[in-house]
Image: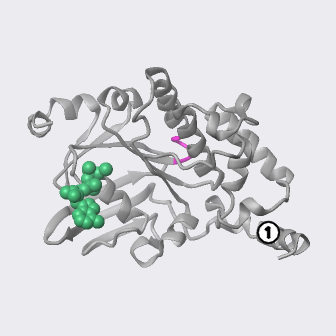
Amino acid sequence: MGLLQQTRELLRRDQLFPFMMPELNPALDISHRTILYMEGVSVSFDGFRAINNLNLYIDAGELRCIIGPNGAGKSTMMDIITGRTRPDSGSVWFGQRLNLLTMSEPEIANAGIGRKFQQPTVFEGHSVETNLWLALATDKRVWPTLLARPQPAQREQIDQVLETIGLRDQRRLRAGALSHGQKQWLEIGMLLMQRPQLLLVDEPVAGMTHQEMDRTAELLRQLAGAHSVVVVEHDMGFVRSLESKVTVLHQGSVLAEGSMDRVQADPRVREVYLGE
Ligand code: ADP
Ligand code: MG
């Protein structure tokens, strides 16, 4: 493909972006205040029930923390929400109208659910701001070769995201030169470029310094409200600092739910964590 043709292709696809912006997604109906419903969800792998009659409800704008021992089903739960794993039974809805069990992984992502995996996957050779720009691309294999420039609206969005993730001063730095914590923030920023309504974040602070953990807690608290944020995390000090409602998963079901103080005082929760 010639450069002119590539640029035409880019501009054409650029016009599609508004339709991919979830806040304009007319199908997402959160009039009942709940953005995610999981009801009676079960899935087995080779006869082992990783998720067992799970019921989980997330409010629009809520920050929720999911904790639980290793193997409790936390990552599998996220796999089900994002369409990577199909449950054997149960229902999973995004707002009132979007049945996630009938949607493909890309459809779910485009509908406004963004997921951050544990390992950051930034483009190390590109600058911080180029990473954010490239995050708008749906096909990352094609876009890095394009020579086009972001449009004014996208520049503004990049500026806003840089401000949010606290990397304004590092915008021209190669992503590979960032600290581990900064790479995690950049990846959260890359998710934000796609304007998700619901963010799923798996173990964001593993390997971070205490200072980076504090800033991450601040960032996630700040994102709540305009977004719904579900955080899976092991570090109890960090979970406490989020000051959110906590759901304890155990053997694929909800064992306890409530404030951090309340779930930590629950004898069943204590028993489950004794083995850790
Ligand atoms: P957590 O994230 O809470 O540590 P996981 O959701 O990763 O737990 O795993 C829950 C259980 O399901 C574990 O026992 C795990 O080995 C099993 N499991 C998860 N995914 C698969 C899979 N694709 N195939 C087989 N077993 C799996
Ligand atoms: Mg996990």
At x 50%, y 60%, the residue is 31
> Residue 136: which quarter of the image?
bottom right
Q: Is residue 226 magenta?
A: yes
Please state the horizontal and vertical placement of residue 55, each as a whole percent of the image: 26, 59
Please name whichever residue, 275 or 58, is drawn nearer the observer in this view of the structure: 275
Q: Main secondary structure of the magenta part?
A: loop
Q: Image check: 18 left or right of 43?
A: right
Please name whichever residue, 43 or 149, is drawn nearer the observer in this view of the structure: 149
Q: Quadrant of ligand 1?
A: bottom left
In magenta, the rendered stretch is 223-227
Q: Amino acid at mark 1?
A: Gln
- 264 to 67, vertically: above or below: above
Please name whichever residue, 230 or 274, is drawn nearer the observer in this view of the structure: 274
Q: Could you tell me which secondary element the residue under label 1 belongs to?
A: loop
Residue labelled with disc 1 = 15
Quarter containing the C terminus: top left
Please state the horizontal and vertical placement of residue 166, each as a whole percent of the image: 64, 30
- 4 to 175, vertically: above or below: below
Q: Is residue 252 visible?
A: no
Query: Among all residues in the image, which is located at the extreme right?
Result: 4
